[in-house]
């Protein structure tokens, strides 16, 4: 119980940092300086305004200084980071795999929200993400499978992007490579299938209602991220279930 509280508290802080990261990557600002400020009025925030979730609830979702509405994204990112980290902890305990999973989760959440906000997945996120994954792989699944996963998944997206020009952004290609590093080749194939299914399920009702057509551009980042997280977490179980179903 104590461990869950610690993991929960710590991951809320990470989630709070991810909000800053999303905002500053999109503003092309330094990640470390200046101190956190209200995006609406520019007021530098005090420590009491920066307590994850709690500040949002106590202030009724408004800035203490300008009373402007704080985006629901802030508590959402914080609680999502907390929930996913606790799920990883419940499965792997305090292990190397747990740290690996938390870093991967943080990268996926950040990429999803920069994409949702502005349709961008910045290089300043994906390049360090790919490097981090390669370093971690040296101590776990092996660098060979990581590089293979990145080359095949990233390469596949690169080909699609060059064949159907404008259909896919450069950010998606680098995110695919990042995911391949963390999941390896077999995982990357599963991520591709699952993310295509999810994106299809999302777009189909919109098409039926006439709100989307073949030309509608959908943001792939969040679908890739959800699929990647599920595969990283439950890939082996999914593979086993599939093999059992085949037999
Ligand atoms: Zn403000």
Image (tube, helix red, strand yellow):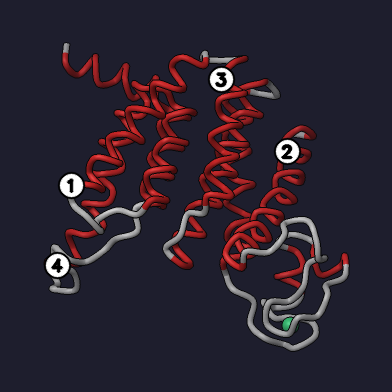
- N-terminal of the pair, mark 2 or mark 4, is 2
- Residue 107, given in percent of the width and then of the height, sits at 56, 44
Q: Quadrant of residue 83?
A: top right
Label 4 residue SS = loop
Q: Where 65 sits versus 72, above or below? A: below
Name the residue carrying label 3.
Answer: 137
- N-terminal of the pair, mark 1 or mark 4, is 1
Q: Residue at x 76, y 43 (%)?
A: 10
Pair 3/1: label in front? 1
How packed mark 4 is, by other alpha carbons closer than 10 Å (few <14, some 14-19, many 20 or more), is few
Name the residue carrying label 2.
Answer: 7
* Alpha-carbon span between mark 1 and mark 4: 19 Å
- N-terminal of the pair, mark 1 or mark 2, is 2
Pair 1/4: label in front? 1
Q: Where 190 sits versus 31, above or below? A: above
Judged left or right of residue 164, residue 81 is right
- N-terminal of the pair, mark 3 or mark 4, is 3
Q: Residue at x 76, y 81 (%)?
A: 42
* Alpha-carbon span between mark 2 and mark 4: 44 Å
For the N terminus, which image quadrant? top right
Q: Quadrant of residue 35?
A: bottom right
Q: Regarding ligand 1, which quadrant of the image does it lie in? A: bottom right
How packed mark 3 is, by other alpha carbons closer than 10 Å (few <14, some 14-19, many 20 or more), is many
How packed mark 1 is, by other alpha carbons closer than 10 Å (few <14, some 14-19, many 20 or more), is few
Q: Residue at x 57, y 70 (%)?
A: 72
Give the label on residue 239, or none: none
Pair 3/2: label in front? 3
* Alpha-carbon span between mark 3 and mark 2: 23 Å
Judged left or right of residue 52, residue 128 is left
Name the residue carrying label 4.
Answer: 213
């Amino acid at each position: 119980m104590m461990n869950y509280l610690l993991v929960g508290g710590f991951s809320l802080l990470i989630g709070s940092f991810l909000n800053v990261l999303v905002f500053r990557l999109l503003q092309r600002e330094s990640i470390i300086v200046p101190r956190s400020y209200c995006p609406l009025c520019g007021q530098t925030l005090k420590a009491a305004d920066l307590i994850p979730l709690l500040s949002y609830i106590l202030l009724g979702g408004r800035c203490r200084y300008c009373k402007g509405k704080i985006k629901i994204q802030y508590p959402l990112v914080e609680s999502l980071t907390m929930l996913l980290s606790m799920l990883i902890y419940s499965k792997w305990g305090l292990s190397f795999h747990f740290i690996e999973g938390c870093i991967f989760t943080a990268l996926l959440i950040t990429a999803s929200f920069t994409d949702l906000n502005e349709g961008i997945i910045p290089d300043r996120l994906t390049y360090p993400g790919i490097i981090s994954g390669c370093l971690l792989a040296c101590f776990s699944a092996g660098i060979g499978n990581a590089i293979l996963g990145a080359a095949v998944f990233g390469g596949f997206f690169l080909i699609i992007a060059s064949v159907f020009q404008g259909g896919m952004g450069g950010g998606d290609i680098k995110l695919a490579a990042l995911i391949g590093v963390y999941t390896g080749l077999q995982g990357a194939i599963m991520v591709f299938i699952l993310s295509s299914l999810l994106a299809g399920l999302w777009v189909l009702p919109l098409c039926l209602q006439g709100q989307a057509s073949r030309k509608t551009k959908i943001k792939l980042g969040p679908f890739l991220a959800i699929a990647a997280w599920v595969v990283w977490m439950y890939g082996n179980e999914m593979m086993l279930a599939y093999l059992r179903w085949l037999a």
